[in-house]
Amino acid sequence: SKGVAWLYSEIGALLDIWADPEIQEQLAGRLHNMCIYDKISKRLSDLGIQRTGEQCREKIKKLRRDYKTVVDNNYSPAFARKVLGCYDKVHEVFGKCTIIRPPFVIESLAYNESNPNTSKNSPNLRKKKRNMNAFTPIDLSAKDLDQSKSSLELQINKQCKQTSSRKKSSEEKRKRLKTLSDANKTLETELRLHQTDLLNRILNIQRKQNDEILQHQREHLLKEEQHRREIRKTEIDLFKSVLFLLAEKKGIHLKLQ
């Protein structure tokens, strides 16, 4: 996959191998580039990094395009690091190059040999190669520059959209929090009112119970007092009767009120 993610350490290892003089000499020769990138893939595999030759080639091309964008736009190192996260390592390798452009890929020799209509000594083929060598790098460079600018614009637009999305999400969160806070306040107010009403009801019930208890005790005391009076009256009447009997026996006439 061309869109595979690369770690910073993996990019550093790729650049170190790519910048190896032996690899650079092979890239400058007539050997098909993919064969060389397969070798780079093998050396990465020895380091425990599993990438195909095509993935290595595409990553180098992208790094060179991004670095060319940084150089052409004269970005400051600080801003360059934002555009190109591994800027320091890329600058260390590509900064030595006089022209920053993706390498020109020579057609496969196997393909040329297998095509019966193609001859290495054909004048038309030599003329075509001369024309390609004369104009293709410039066209590729301009194309890569446009692609890099387009890529940068897409990145900026993506960052703007992400920032706008984060702001919108933050505003929505604040609104939800405010709504929840208002709802909590309303619930707390209703709960306090309910508690107050419930407490008043409990107090009224308790007050009625106390009044009933006091009334019952008052009635009980009145009954006891009446009973004591009746007993006392009975005792007095009995005492009078005894006195009358004793007086009659002794012939005494008593007048009691």
Image: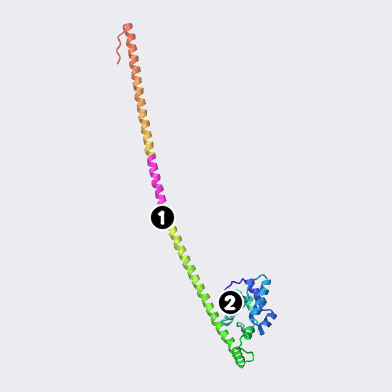
Note whether 238 is above or below 188 in the view shown. Answer: above
Q: Is residue 179 left or right of residue 61?
A: left
Q: Quadrant of the N terminus?
A: bottom right
Note whether 86 is above or below 129 in the view shown. Answer: above
* Residue type (three-letter) at the residue carrying disc 2: Ala
Q: Residue furthest front?
A: 116
Residue pointed to by mark 2? 80
Residue range (magenta): 189-205
Label 2: which secondary element: helix
Q: Considering depth in this image, is 215 or 183 the residue closer to the camera?
A: 183
Point out residue 168 in the picture as x, y percentages from the top left corner: 46, 67
Residue at x 43% of width, y 60% of height: 179
SS assignment for the magenta stretch, majority: helix
Residue at x 59% of width, y 90% of height: 128
Q: Is residue 65 left or right of residue 185?
A: right
C-alpha distance separating marks 2 and 1: 53 Å
* Residue type (three-letter) at the residue carrying disc 1: Thr
Q: Is residue 204 magenta?
A: yes
Q: Quadrant of residue 94?
A: bottom right
Q: Quadrant of the C terminus?
A: top left
Q: Considering depth in this image, is 95 or 51 the residue closer to the camera?
A: 51
Note whether 244 is above or below 23 in the view shown. Answer: above
Q: Residue furthest right?
A: 22
Residue pointed to by mark 1? 186
Dot 2, how many residues are within 10 Å of its Cα: few (below 14), some (14-19), or many (20+)?
A: many
Point out residue 228 in the picture as x, y percentages from the top left corner: 36, 23
Point out residue 139 in the picture as x, y percentages from the top left corner: 56, 86
Q: Considering depth in this image, is 2 or 74 the residue closer to the camera?
A: 2
